[in-house]
Image (cartoon, helix red, strand yellow):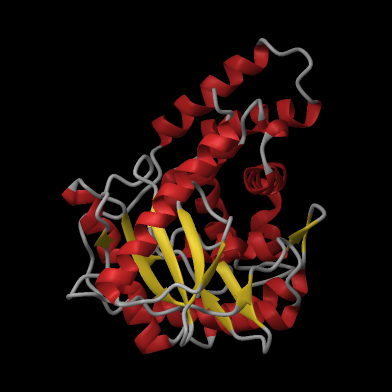
Amino acid sequence: MKNPTEALAIEESLAREDVFAHLSREWNIEVCSYSAVYRGLSNWKWVVNTPDNKLFVKCYHPKRYRLDEPKHKISIARSLSFQRLLHDRANVCPDVMMHNGEMIIQSDSGYFYVVMEHFDGTPPRAGCLDANMMYRLGQASGRMHAVLSQYPEQGAPWRPVLTTMQEKWQIQMDQSMELPSLPTRLKRALERQGELLHQLDLSIFDALVPGWAHWDLWVDNILIGADGDIRLVDFDTVQWGYPEVDVARVILSGALRNGQLQIGPTAAFLKGYREESPFAPGRLSLSLQLLWCREAHWWLKTNMDTFSAPPKRFAEEMLWLTEHWDHLDTWLGPEGIMVK
């Protein structure tokens, strides 16, 4: 019997060989060499060297993305269309290549994949972006939202649902009661999460204006080139929701270090962002609260100490928001003493 690691390697190899053969025959692309990219969840990604240039190839894992189902394929195609527009109009992301009028291509064995322009950059470390890079990231994020804001709504926007948050919290709270050795900090965080959910009035978000958002804007989906150029990547989950979620997510990801929100980089991001898109003074506190409503029940779990690196980072961010909820308005709200 193969161990899980061997099974995953075989699965990746089968997908890669099939996709590369399809590239050669249908696109006339000669793959001279490749390197695997091990960021993200489940999907397979490769940087492909051809005689002329480098390309980025992404193959969707069939168990994560059922692109054989039309509604899922349409959703991903819409997101990729936004990426192409953002490349053309704002130059904030790599271009998506088309083949016979399609962006999502199916190989002979049924694997769905896309081919993109390669950008030679690396993702920054979480919490380690300085003020200059956060300023440039703010500009890129603002340009992205400025372009996306030109496109019409599509149905009702995402909104947090209090009963869903409470139900998911209750499951974790019940589990915590059966774990006497649960770390004190996590137990207190779960208790505090319950208190916040009990008092939360979702009408505080009524003033926010819905819009298209990247919806997964954290350091792994940011590439920084040698000259400091920034590209945003992984647009698979573009959502009609609230751009404030992107702002909150990227600020936490880039500027929360060792349990402290770095004020200089945070202010620099907002300065760059406001040069490209409107963002009301004091809006950051509400944005962070909205992000908490979206993510806290994903990451505040009794087993968070066993999480791998990315989920562990997300959990730490939600812990920080939970522990500092009462200070967000004072620090970052309309009368914020730190950042407005």
Residue at 74%, 68% (x, y): give it.
337
Q: Nearer the viewer, residue 318 or 75?
A: 75
Percent position of residue 193, x then y: 61, 33
Residue at 69%, 71% (x, y): give it.
266
Percent position of residue 124, x then y: 69, 68
Percent position of residue 285, x then y: 59, 59
Is residue 270 depicted above or below 70 in this figure? below
Q: Quadrant of residue 328?
A: bottom right
Q: Is residue 219 left or right of residue 22?
A: right
Residue at 27%, 49% (x, y): give it.
109
Q: Is residue 111 left or right of residue 335?
A: left
Res 238 seen here: no
Number of numbered discs on residues? 0
Q: Nearer the viewer, residue 71 or 189?
A: 71
Q: Nearer the viewer, residue 30 or 85?
A: 30
Percent position of residue 155, x then y: 20, 56
View extreme (top): residue = 178
Is residue 36 depicted above or below 87 in this figure? above
Res 266 seen here: yes
Quarter in which the N terminus is drawn: top right
Quarter in which the C terminus is drawn: bottom right
Q: Is residue 301 left or right of residue 170?
A: right
